[in-house]
């Protein structure tokens, strides 16, 4: 019942193994490049001014003043 692995099997196995490795390396390089572009795009943005907070419409502040 035992079967031996033929040379044809090993040829196909090696071909599929190297194809999978090549695809893995190519995708890893692609995603690495995309991540680096995203990081570089964030660092090269021109600085924006501070955001203005919306004006308060009523005095709902119930904190105690700490001034002397």
Image (spheres, rainbow, N blue to C red):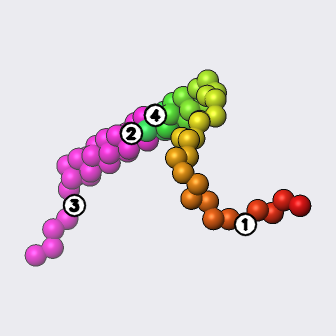
Q: Where residue 66 sits in the image (x, y, percent)?
A: 81, 63
Residues shaded magenta: 1-30
Question: Is disc 2 placed on a helix, strand or loop?
Answer: helix
Q: Gap between marks 4 and 3, in whole Å?
A: 42 Å
| Residue 44 visible | no
Q: Gap between marks 4 and 1, in whole Å?
A: 51 Å
Residue marked by disc 1: 64
Number of numbered discs present? 4
Residue marked by disc 3: 5
Q: Gap between marks 3 and 1, in whole Å?
A: 83 Å
In depth, the one of 32 and 66 nearer the eye is 66
Q: Is residue 8 magenta?
A: yes
In depth, the one of 30 and 1 nearer the eye is 30
| Residue 21 visible | yes
Q: Which mark is residue 34?
A: 4
Determine whether, in the image, residue 44 is placed left or right of residue 21. Answer: right
Q: Where residue 1 sits in the image (x, y, percent)?
A: 10, 76
Of tags 4 and 2, the one toward the viewer is 4
Residue drawn at 54 percent across, 51 percent down? 58
Residue 43 location, quadrant = top right
Q: Gap between marks 1 and 2, in whole Å?
A: 59 Å
Q: Gap between marks 4 and 2, in whole Å?
A: 11 Å
Question: Is disc 4 placed on a helix, strand or loop?
Answer: helix
Quarter placement of the C terminus? bottom right
Question: Is disc 3 placed on a helix, strand or loop?
Answer: loop
Q: Where residue 18 sits in the image (x, y, percent)?
A: 35, 43
Labels 4 and 3: the sequence-earlier one: 3
Residue marked by disc 2: 27
């Amino acid at each position: 019942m035992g079967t031996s692995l033929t040379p044809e099997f090993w040829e196909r196995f090696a071909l599929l193994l190297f194809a999978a490795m090549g695809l893995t390396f190519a995708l890893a390089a692609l995603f690495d490049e995309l991540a680096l572009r995203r990081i570089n795009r964030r660092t090269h943005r021109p600085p924006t001014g501070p955001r203005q907070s919306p004006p308060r419409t009523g005095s709902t502040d119930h904190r105690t003043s700490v001034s002397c």
